[in-house]
Image (tube, rainbow, N blue to C red):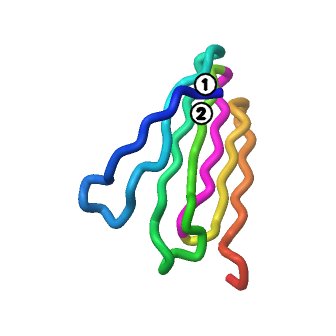
Amino acid sequence: MPSQKSSQGSGSGYSYTSSGTNSQGNHYCSRDYGSSAPNQNSYHYSNTDGSYYYSNPNGSTYHNDGQGGATYTPPEGK
């Protein structure tokens, strides 16, 4: 599990709920965008193999496998 810390965002409409790096060196960050966002609790993580994943506040997701492959999923209904 990543180490966790909680703090307020920098006036950008969100607050950090947790972030950290686990023992394998993989990074994780979670943000709360409030009740007006389709995906209130968005997050991203990045791994030491170069892959990363974003779950965005608008409901879209993006995954890069670190080897040139990527998948984008648009917000529901778009």
Screen quadrant of the C terminus: bottom right
Residue at position x 59%, y 18% from top?
25
Tag 1–tag 2 contact (CB < 8 Å)? yes
Mark 1 falls on what kind of element? Answer: loop
What is the x, y in percent for residue 11? 25, 61
Q: Which residue is mark 2?
A: 46
Screen quadrant of the N terminus: top right
Q: Is residue 31 left or right of residue 62?
A: left
Would you say residue 44 sits in the magenta stretch? Answer: no
Q: Which residue is mark 1?
A: 26
How many residues crowd mark 2 within 10 Å: few (<14), some (14–19), many (20+)?
Answer: some
Mark 2 falls on what kind of element? Answer: strand
Q: Is residue 20 above or below residue 17?
A: above
Q: CA–CA distance between discs 1 and 2?
A: 6 Å
**Which sits in the foreground, 48 or 5?**
5
Residue at the limit of the structure toward the left, as seen here: 11
Q: Mark number for residue 5?
A: none
How many residues crowd mark 1 within 10 Å: few (<14), some (14–19), many (20+)?
Answer: some
Please tell me in which quadrant of the rendered image residue 46 appears.
top right
What is the x, y in percent for residue 42? 56, 57
Q: Amino acid at mark 2?
A: Ser
Residue at position x 26%, y 53% from top?
10
Would you say residue 51 sits in the magenta stretch? Answer: yes
Please tell me in which quadrant of the rendered image residue 14 appears.
bottom left
Residue span colored magenta: 49-57
